[in-house]
Amino acid sequence: MKLFRKISYGWSLFGYFKQTWRKLYSIPGNIDRLTLLQQHQYIQSLLAQPRYSDPKRLHRFEQQVFSQNGEDGVLAEIFRRVGTTDRRFLEIGVGDGLENCTTFFLGQGWKGWWIDGDDAAVEKIHRHFWQPLKRGELVVRRALVTAENIAQIVAELKVPTEFDLFSLDIDRNTWYVWQALKHLRPRVVVVEYNSTFPAEVAWKVDYAGDKIYNCTSYFGASL
């Protein structure tokens, strides 16, 4: 009888710890859901302000599918308003393709070109996007982009002068590469800028083609 009681007590204690572990294990997920709910409520309270009733303000259209933030939704709204022509894009600094400004459009039947200088990222692109690559809907080029070589790279890819969407985000030398592509005439442009500096301050990083982002605020240019 004592042995039975000990076994019963042991199973009861085991069940208690198992239940407690499940509760503890669920805490991070519950916190994440609560955080998302609070973020949503906060955003809705901001959008309810009169200043955001102006249709020219695109904040209420923000939606994240593959973009880092809400660029997917904003760009979709822009093209809803202005329409599309060739439904082609060029993105420089595309990463591994899973978080950028054009993957969403690729999934909507667009075609285009991706350029990135990271070998591992380009390898992932070939692994994850082999179908659009095989169909010729997507062309990928691995290249360390500089102000001196970007025009030649774009020419080799046979990117037309006029197309719908251009996105540029290479951190440090973004401004200089943008200046080197003045001959392009995309209808919509997404270019990274350094928000550390106020818009009225004219600032840009010193150019160095062999330098990359060093994880500080020393990159790009002010708005």
Image: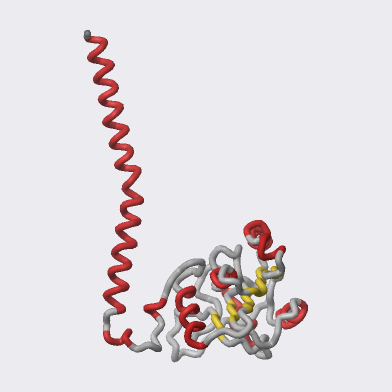
Q: Is residue 39 above or below residue 47?
A: above
Q: Quadrant of the N terminus?
A: top left
User: Which one is nearer the viewer's eye here, 127 or 175?
Assistant: 127
Q: Does residue 103 appear left or right of residue 65 in this picture?
A: right
Q: Does residue 214 appear left or right of residue 125 in this picture?
A: left
The quarter of the picture where residue 141 lies is bottom right
- Label total for image: 0
Q: Position of residue 104 (x, y in %)?
A: 54, 70
Q: Is residue 75 above or below residue 11?
A: below
Identify the residue at image location x=60%, y=71%: 109
The quarter of the picture where residue 176 lies is bottom right
Q: Position of residue 131 (x, y in %)?
A: 67, 61
User: Which one is nearer the viewer's eye here, 168 or 102?
Assistant: 102
Q: Is residue 2 above or below residue 31?
A: above
Q: Does residue 180 appear left or right of residue 33 in this picture?
A: right
Identify the residue at image location x=28%, y=16%: 7
